[in-house]
């Protein structure tokens, strides 16, 4: 199984809402990633988790809160987002965080109204 | 990580070989060349990577010049499903990050 799954596929939320994005992999990978991709732009790294610990935060605003409850799951908690946060949010995983290829999920298309 | 330069767009006829160039003139000795692609509305997909030798897998071939300053990704028999944005990424051995550039939008025409 080389699949990374993400739910939901689409999410529309207001600026005062709290929502969460979920990512799951069953490849035994120990590194997981969140990326943000705006329209017609390349993906940009947000967070890296290695062995369930946050190892990289690319100066992401605190309204985005990642969580790694176990080695297979990665969540991204969203609170008080702005319309400019509307984007495709991609999750990825790799064997560990030291140079292995990353496997990406299909993404969650988020619209903030 | 070294910077890469790719043409913004390319066209190729279905059934022909698609050759996607990438310049990475500042690459250092322990940096690998990775290729990913992103089909519309999907997540990026790993294709291939190499250090200095040419590499081939079931998806593509990667040709790296002897001085390592450029490389070419070859899709031997392009199909319509190969239409995607192709990203060439130079990455330090053991690096945590994957930094995407602007990529090449490849369109396969029937």
Image (spheres, rainbow, N blue to C red):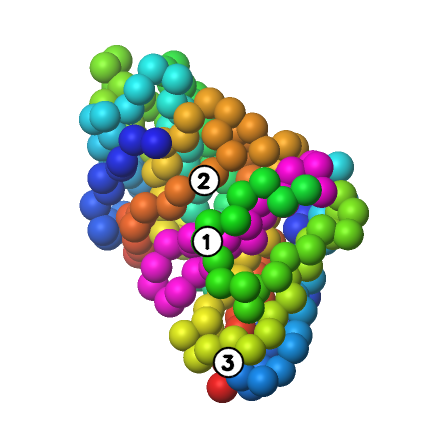
Report how far apart the C-alphas of labels 1 and 2 lie in the structure.
16 Å
Residue A16 in sight in this render: yes
Crowding around mark 3 (Cα neighbors within 10 Å: few <14, some 14 to 19, many 20+) is some
Q: Classify mark 1: helix, strand or loop.
A: loop
Q: Classify mark 3: helix, strand or loop.
A: strand
Badge 3: chain ID? A
Q: Where in the figure is residue A97, as x and y percent of width and height?
A: 59, 33
Decide whether residue A27 is among the magenta residues. Answer: no
Residue A41 occupies which quadrant of the picture? bottom left
Q: Give the answer, above or below, for where B105 lies relative to B93.
A: below
Residue at the extreme front of the image, as rendered: A62
Q: Which residues are magenta?
A: A30-52
Q: Along the line of sight, which residue is nearer the eye, B83 or B1? A: B1
Residue shown at the point (29%, 31%) measured from the top left: B2
Q: Which residue is mark 2?
A: B98
Q: Where in the figure is residue B54, as x and y percent of width and height?
A: 38, 18
Q: Are marks 1 and 2 on the same chain?
A: no
Q: Which residue is mark 3?
A: A112
């Amino acid at each position: 199984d080389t699949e990374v799954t993400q739910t939901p596929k689409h999410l529309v939320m207001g600026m005062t809402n709290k929502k969460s994005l979920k990512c799951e992999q069953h490849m035994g990978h120990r590194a997981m990633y969140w990326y943000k991709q705006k329209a017609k732009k390349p993906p940009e790294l947000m967070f890296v988790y290695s062995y369930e610990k946050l190892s990289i935060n690319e100066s992401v605003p605190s309204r985005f809160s990642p969580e790694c409850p176990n080695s297979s799951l990665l969540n991204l908690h969203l609170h008080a987002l702005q319309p400019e946060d509307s984007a495709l949010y991609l999750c990825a995983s790799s064997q560990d965080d030291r140079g292995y290829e990353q496997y990406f999920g299909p993404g969650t298309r988020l619209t903030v109204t | 990580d070294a910077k890469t330069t790719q043409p913004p767009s390319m066209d190729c006829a279905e059934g022909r070989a698609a050759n996607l160039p990438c310049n990475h003139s500042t690459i250092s000795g322990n940096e690998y060349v990775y290729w990913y692609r992103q089909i519309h509305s999907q997540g990026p997909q790993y294709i291939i990577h190499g250090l200095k030798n040419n590499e081939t897998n079931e998806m593509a071939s990667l040709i790296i010049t002897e001085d390592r300053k450029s490389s070419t990704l070859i899709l031997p028999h392009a199909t319509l499903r190969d239409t995607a944005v192709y990203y060439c990424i130079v990455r330090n051995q053991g690096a945590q990050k994957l930094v995407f550039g602007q990529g090449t939008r490849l369109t396969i025409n029937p």
